[in-house]
Image (cartoon, rainbow, N blue to C red):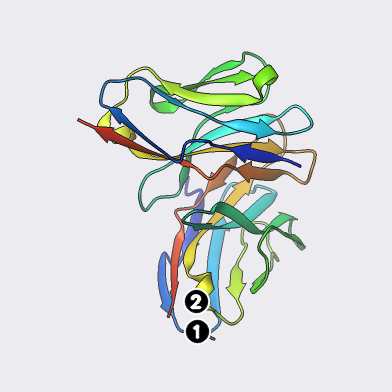
Amino acid sequence: DAGITQSPRYKITETGRQVTLMCHQTWSHSYMFWYRQDLGHGLRLIYYSAAADITDKGEVPDGYVVSRSKTENFPLTLESATRSQTSVYFCASSELGTGLAIYFGEGSWLTVV
Amino acid sequence: AQSVTQPDIHITVSEGASLELRCNYSYGATPYLFWYVQSPGQGLQLLLKYFSGDTLVQGIKGFEAEFKRSQSSFNLRKPSVHWSDAAEYFCAVGAPNTGNQFYFGTGTSLTVIP
């Protein structure tokens, strides 16, 4: 049971470059999420998706783009990376219904120089 | 508005001592409550969850949590802490009635001293 896999796990990029973080889940969960984790801020929701082709903004969406053409994939793109986007990014998935919980990937460490 | 507060940013306990991590939430309906643990360099792992029934729930690694509606609290406890419990702990509220949103506290960092 692979669960959620994120790639790359570690990335260094330059300011202004486009970066895409990949997320793949094997549970067929309807909901998928992208969070960023920064010291002093905890987890902040960037975007989420309720199903394929349905996405919505979270708390901190500016500078990010998402898509969800297939249920199992939810890539996050930084269109023009800035230093303030240096962070750890977590993809997660969930399913509605009794016993719902949110399950996380291992994280993607992104440094923008 | 939904929110989660973890009043303790950092806690230090001795190995073998008991532990209680506090969590208070604000949510208009019946909450779905969770505790997660994050070891350094890792993702968040689900420790336990509550959504109905017995207000004392058991989780993995010997943890338990008690839901107290009157206090809007969901505190995490462990009778005897092990050095391997040193990690960051997050409390979360799930809101299935508002687009399946999840709201996380800012976390409590646990240090365990020998």
C-beta proximity under 8 Å, tags 2 and 1? yes
* Amino acid type of the residue that numbered disc 1 sits on in the rendered structure: Thr
Q: Quadrant of the C terminus of chain A?
A: bottom left
CA gap between label 2 and label 1 equals 7 Å
Side of B89 relative to A91 (left or right): left
Residue A19 spot, x, y in % from top left: 53, 77
- Where residue A93 appears, as percent x and y from the top left, is 61, 49
Residue sitting at x 75%, y 60%: A56
Q: Which mark is residue A83?
A: 2
Q: Is residue A36 above or below residue A27?
A: below
Same chain check for tags 2 and 1: yes
Spot occupied by residue B100 in the image (x, y as percentages of width and height): 73, 44
Q: Amino acid at mark 2?
A: Arg
Would you name the residue on which mark 1 appears? A15
**Closer to us: B47 or A67:** B47
For this orientation, the residue located farthest to the top is B54
